[in-house]
Image (spheres, rainbow, N blue to C red):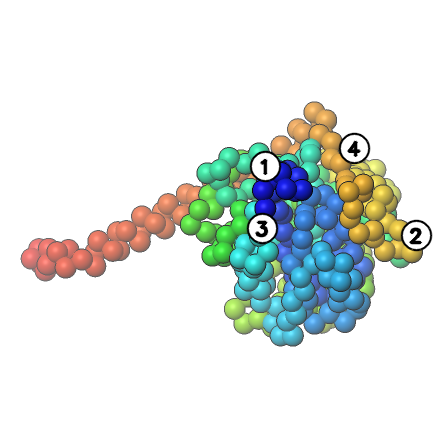
Amino acid sequence: MAAGAGVDAREICAMKVVMTLLVRDEADIVDAQIAFHLHAGVDFVIATDNRSQDGTTEILERYERAGFLHLLREEGDDMRQPEWVTRMARLAATDFGADWVINADADEFWWPRGGSLEDVFATVPERYGVIRGCWRHFLPRPDDKGFFAERMTVRLGMPAFPGDKKTIFHAHQKVAHRADGNVTIEAGNHNALGASLDPIRAWHPIEVLHFSFRSVQQLERKGRGGWLRNAGYEPTLHQLLLDEALRTGRLEDFYASFVVPDEALERGVRDGTLALDTRLRDALRKLRAENGTFRLPDSHSTLSFSRPDVREDALYAGEASVLVEIDSIVRAEQRVGAFEERLAAVERRPFSRLHRLASR
């Protein structure tokens, strides 16, 4: 249909952003997570539900009935995350007309640093296919059984370097990518691989607000997931520690070790290790209905994202600089690995073998 035949030309050229979501027993957060992103620039969600039993499935089905979500189900008890997320990311390109794909977890809220998510993607030069967001970890406060976003307004100001084994909250990146029917998503959704998916390095225009430890009950559900039953999966430190706490009956103590009491908050704000951050709380208040559910998107209910001030920009740059350093190390390791592979290939050539025999 031509642009002048009753269709707005802007709609024809509109960018489509699709989010993939792998969930298992995330009823305390998944409604807010989906609603937030649908109001922040995501157009559609592809979700895989893995054996949820806490009401998560019913929340996903509500969005599916409203036409905002395509629901897949996996009954395996081994949480094959890279395989399942890769499948969704490819479907976004081949079956759902995506231009850009965000591969998110249920405890993540992708916050653009100005404009909408679509605005961020629209600025990416054509030759690049991957942009990176910086994880920003939020910590629990003393649990009053209230909604997570109302009581989790404390953000870790200085996440550890990933190689630091003393803490589980470390700096890391998450990636969004141009839609690609052959993309491969690595474990943790930390990288997207494809022939034309070159990343923009040293630029992190999206903050990924991360709410991983929300309550003792949520941690128990998280710990009983299928991660450690996947023989090919390399568990993270927090998964190993959580599993140990479950097995030894110390789950409440494990959770309490991350709770920030008043005196620790005051001290952390003073020394810069902690920060008060109410952005998600305030955004979700705008979207939450009186019955506790979240409103479906419409043309009048989009979220707006203002540019941060100079001080916040500086703090964010400090956190993101760690990711730049990590990226440099990884690239150096990749170059060494590629050189060793080329050298081994040369050594395998017939002429090289004859040369070695002749020199004996």
Quarter of the image for residue 50 reads bottom right
The type of residue carrying mark 4 is: Arg
Quick one: 38 or 315, which is closer to the camera?
A: 38
Quarter of the image for residue 281 reads top right
72 shown above or below 346: below
For the point 56% across and 47% down, the residue is: 99
- Badge 4 marks a residue whose secondary structure is helix
- Are discs 1 and 3 less than 8 Å apart at CB? no
Mark 3 to mark 4: distance in Å?
A: 44 Å
Mark 1 to mark 3: distance in Å?
A: 13 Å
**Mark 4 vs mark 2: which is more N-terminal?**
4
**Mark 2 vs mark 3: which is more N-terminal?**
3
Q: Tell me the residue that label 2 is attached to.
A: 290
- Locate residue 206 relative to residue 300 in the image: left or right: left
Mark 1 to mark 4: distance in Å?
A: 38 Å
Q: Tell me the residue that label 1 is attached to.
A: 122
- Are discs 4 and 2 less than 8 Å apart at CB? no
- Badge 1 marks a residue whose secondary structure is helix
Q: Residue furthest top?
A: 310
**Mark 1 vs mark 3: which is more N-terminal?**
3
The type of residue carrying mark 1 is: Ala
267 shown above or below 250: above
Q: Tell me the residue that label 3 is attached to.
A: 98
The type of residue carrying mark 2 is: Glu
Q: Tell me the residue that label 4 is attached to.
A: 270
